């Protein structure tokens, strides 16, 4: 280990950080300056990676959970030779068009493994990556060759460990004995408001020991000690490891180190000058020549290691042609079509029940589909009869018992998807999506095709009452850019909804499913299975070709709309099932007009708040639920709230 060169890398990280943040007049210099030594050692000696091939399947993953310290990652990507991160990006830190955004953004540059803005989510995503590595290793490795054998590292700060999502994820990671998950804890005891003593005085080490982790202690500024601690972490195969490193925030800034002033604001021109003088930094955006030469010398070593793996992979491929074909399918990002379960008009089934049959079919056709629910496998109807339960003793299992940890479940699912090779689904009651919404938002931001199964989707939950009856949730989902919400109306539509979710590769999908039984209705459109992919289709028969009224409904309310249409007085009524409002609204005008004629009165019906439906109908022509629900049998609750076919018919006949 060339500690002299690593010291020059550390110096360069501090120099680049100070100048980038000062030039942007915005940013967080404290973390990268305080943890520069760890970064130098991590990217120079510890990580199994090759900047020339950031997508190498068997690379180690590194997630900067404390994403506000983004210059830590950007400086290291630049210094170690990742082509996407240039000095110009660093000089335009936090500016429009720069890959060096305020927080690391997945897809902006090679080497950024996850979007990790909100604290704690990166920790959970890293746990998901470790889960994915163990699942794929169990499936593809042979006695002769290990083609997947890498580690997942995460960097967390005091703030990450105060957020609940990190606690949820850490608890599950300990239970699952994720021995290839190694977390560095930057223990500088400073947050924005000041000392952590203001609000955070727990014994973190004991907490993590109680979770079932190996906990190790050291200094952020001792290269040999950190390397030895990582070796001990790797030797402990039955537990994830937390390496607690004592540090000084803003180290190198003579007037602001070890204070909250260095956390989230530029040091100021005078302090930058003082720091440069103290550290011996001669100019702006300075990189010590020995830092460059150190990493340049590493290029050959990294390439040799990756090429050795490639040779192993090719030999494995020759020895295991069936596994190689499966590998290619897993990593293609494309879903194989499933043999759909069949339903007929008149059949009665909750869409969650139909969803389980569709899920089982999708899982049979796609062995890389994995996931589970937050302790609601039965009520969510997401059990997989084959494939086994994923656990420390059975890493080849496909169903994950996430426990009552909705937020961690979603963030871990993001990590599984980000790792590559697997498709992830997760499930809970729709009303509990409030607990996971920040991770759902990141799914959309990162364009990860995670499938969210949300059952018990309306006031028809019934007796559980208003705390369990989602009314505003569909509207809030639709407000998230890039999220596709599918609310199927019957069992047949549910089968197509699952197919649509599996087909999607560029973002997450919500499947909003009913608790109560709904009747499968006839579809007048013979091409409805194709038309539904526009987001909507015409349900009613040809006599509604020139309608007086169009009822637009979603989910179980399509059946309600059909009942109301039968009560229309002297009006031709067309019923449209709009499985996805945002998908339909993205269609060309001609398609929208063919299904919902623009000069025809529209009436909308959905068992939630009306928000967003005003685009399609006047407020008085919308049957919605504008308050919280009520506890009672589903039909009586709907009647009490005025949500009935008679009420809808009254609107039509007005």
Image: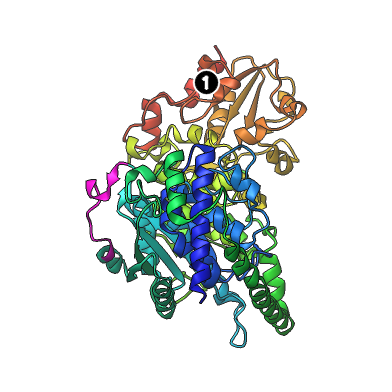
- Compare residues 85 and 625 and report the one nearer the observer: 85
Relative image position of residue 63 (x, y in whole percent)? 50, 58
Relative image position of residue 401 (x, y in whole percent)? 42, 63
**Which residue extends farthest right?**
590
- Compare residues 65 and 558 and report the one nearer the observer: 65
What residue is disc 1 on? 622
Q: Secondary structure at mark 1?
A: strand
Question: In this figure, what is the number of numbered marks?
Answer: 1
- Compare residues 585 and 122 and report the one nearer the observer: 122
Quadrant position of the C terminus in the picture: top right
Q: Is residue 357 visible?
A: no
Q: Is residue 597 magenta?
A: no
Q: Residue at x 54, y 25 (%)?
A: 612
Q: Is residue 221 visible?
A: yes
Q: Is residue 201 magenta?
A: yes
Q: Residue at x 47, y 31 (%)?
A: 607
Q: Quadrant of residue 534?
A: top right
Q: Is residue 324 above or below residue 333?
A: below
Q: Is residue 225 above or below residue 614?
A: below
Read off the magenta span: 193-205
Q: Is residue 50 above or below residue 309?
A: above
Q: Residue at x 72, y 83 (%)?
A: 315
């Amino acid at each position: 280990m060339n500690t002299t060169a690593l010291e020059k890398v550390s110096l360069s990280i501090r120099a680049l950080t100070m100048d980038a943040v000062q030039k942007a007049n915005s940013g967080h210099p404290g973390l990268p300056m305080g943890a520069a030594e760890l970064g130098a050692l991590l990217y120079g000696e510890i990580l199994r990676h090759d900047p020339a091939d950031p997508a190498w399947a068997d690379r180690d993953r590194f997630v900067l959970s404390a994403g506000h310290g983004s210059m830590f990652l950007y400086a290291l990507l630049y210094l170690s030779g990742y082509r996407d991160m240039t000095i110009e990006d660093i000089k335009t830190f936090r500016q429009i068009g720069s890959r060096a955004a305020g927080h690391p953004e997945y897809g902006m540059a090679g080497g950024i493994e996850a979007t990790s803005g909100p604290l704690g989510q990166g920790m959970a995503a890293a746990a998901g990556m470790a889960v994915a590595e163990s699942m794929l290793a169990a499936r593809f490795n042979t006695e002769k060759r290990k083609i997947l054998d890498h580690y997942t590292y995460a960097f967390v700060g005091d703030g990450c460990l105060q957020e609940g999502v990190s606690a949820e994820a850490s608890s599950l990671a300990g239970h699952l004995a994720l021995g290839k998950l190694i977390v560095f804890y930057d223990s500088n005891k400073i947050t924005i408001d000041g000392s952590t003593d203001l609000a955070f005085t727990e014994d973190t080490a004991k907490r993590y020991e109680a979770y079932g982790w190996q906990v190790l202690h050291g200094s952020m500024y001792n290269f040999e000690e950190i390397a030895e601690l990582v070796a001990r972490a790797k030797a402990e195969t039955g537990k994830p490891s937390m390496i607690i490193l004592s540090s000084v925030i803003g180290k190198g800034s003579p007037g602001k180190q070890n204070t909250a002033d260095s956390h989230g604001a530029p040091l100021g021109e005078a302090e930058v000058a003082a720091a440069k003088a103290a550290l011996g930094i001669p100019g702006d955006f300075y990189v010590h020549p020995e830092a460059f030469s150190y990493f340049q010398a590493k290029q050959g070593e990294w390439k040799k290691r990756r090429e050795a793996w490639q040779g192993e992979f090719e030999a494995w491929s020759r020895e295991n042609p069936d596994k190689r074909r499966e590998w290619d399918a897993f990593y293609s990002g494309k879903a194989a079509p499933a043999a759909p379960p069949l339903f007929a008009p008149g059949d009665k089934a909750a869409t969650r029940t139909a969803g389980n049959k569709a899920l089982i079919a999708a899982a049979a056709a796609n062995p890389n589909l994995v996931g589970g629910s937050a302790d609601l496998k039965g009520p969510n109807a997401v059990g997989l009869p084959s494939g086994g339960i994923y656990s420390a003793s059975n890493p080849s299992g496909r169903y994950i018992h996430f426990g009552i940890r909705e937020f961690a479940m979603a963030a871990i699912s993001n990590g599984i998807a980000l790792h590559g090779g697997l498709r992830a689904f997760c499930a809970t009651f729709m009303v509990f999506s409030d607990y996971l919404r920040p991770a759902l938002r990141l799914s959309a931001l990162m364009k990860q095709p995670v499938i969210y199964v949300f059952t018990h989707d309306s006031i028809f939950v019934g007796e559980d009452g208003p705390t369990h009856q989602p009314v505003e949730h569909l509207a809030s989902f639709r407000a998230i850019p890039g999220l596709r919400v599918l609310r199927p109306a019957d069992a047949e539509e549910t089968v197509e909804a699952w197919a649509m979710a599996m087909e999607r590769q560029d973002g997450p999908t919500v499947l909003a499913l009913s608790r109560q039984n709904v009747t499968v209705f006839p579809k007048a459109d013979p091409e409805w299975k194709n038309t539904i992919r526009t987001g909507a289709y015409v349900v009613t028969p040809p006599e509604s070709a020139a309608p007086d009224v169009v009822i637009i409904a979603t989910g179980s309310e399509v059946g309600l709309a059909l009942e109301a249409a039968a009560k229309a007085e002297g009006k031709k009524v067309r019923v449209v099932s709009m499985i996805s409002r945002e998908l339909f609204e993205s269609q060309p005008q001609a398609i929208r007009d063919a299904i919902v004629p623009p000069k025809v009165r529209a009436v909308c019906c959905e068992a939630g708040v009306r928000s967003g439906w005003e685009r399609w109908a006047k407020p008085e022509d919308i049957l919605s639920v504008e308050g919280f629900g009520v506890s009672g049998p589903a039909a009586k609750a709907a009647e009490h709230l005025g949500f009935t076919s008679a009420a809808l018919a009254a609107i039509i006949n007005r």
